[in-house]
Image (spheres, rainbow, N blue to C red):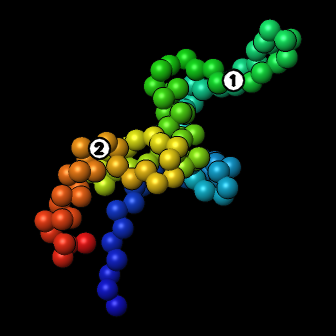
Amino acid sequence: MALSVYSWKRYWGSRTARLDLSDSGYLSDPETDALVAPMGLGVQVNRNSRPSVHWVSTSLLSSLTTMLLEDLAKGTALRCPCGQLFVSNAYQARYHSKQCRWRFEKHKQRHPDED
């Protein structure tokens, strides 16, 4: 039997600390939680006197992190084969730019036996 090695990130806490399993029974990522912690919900009354809910943030970084997490949850944030993250509503999107697509297609054309 082959030995499998997983490069999972480990988080340490004290034995007396409470574990937060509110994320569907899983431990939440403390690094992401620290970025999103300054985010909150706010209510604003619009011109029609109707309340609307919107995100309120104290920093640009927490706003961008929340937007990225929403895009990842919706499936609109994608990863190009080159490793670049990009956002697209197109279901067939695979590359972040035409230049990147041309580069990968030329590579496949020159090396058809590679996977």
Q: Contact, CB < 8 Å: mark 2 with mark 1?
A: no
Which residue is labeled 2 in the image? Answer: 98
Going by the image, does 11 lie left or right of 69?
Answer: left
Mark 1 Cα shell of 10 Å, populated few (<14), some (14-19), many (≥20): few
The amino acid beneath tag 1 is His
Judge the density around disc 2: few (<14), some (14-19), many (≥20) Cα neighbours within 10 Å. Answer: few
The residue where tag 1 is placed is 54
Residue 96 appears in which quarter of the rendering?
Answer: top left
Location of residue 20 with respect to 36 vertically, above or below: below
Question: Could you tell me which residue is drawn at 52 percent across and 26 percent down?
Answer: 63
- On screen, 102 above or below 33? below
- Give the percent coordinates (x, y) of residue 87: 45, 40
In the displayed structure image, the side of residue 79 where residue 38 appears, left or right: right
Tell me the quadrant of the picture where the N terminus can be found.
Answer: bottom left
Q: Residue 17's spot in the image, x, y percent?
A: 59, 47
Counting residues from the start of the chain, the first of labels 2 and 1 encountered is 1
Q: Residue at x 29, y 44 (%)?
A: 98
The CA span between labels 2 and 1 is 35 Å
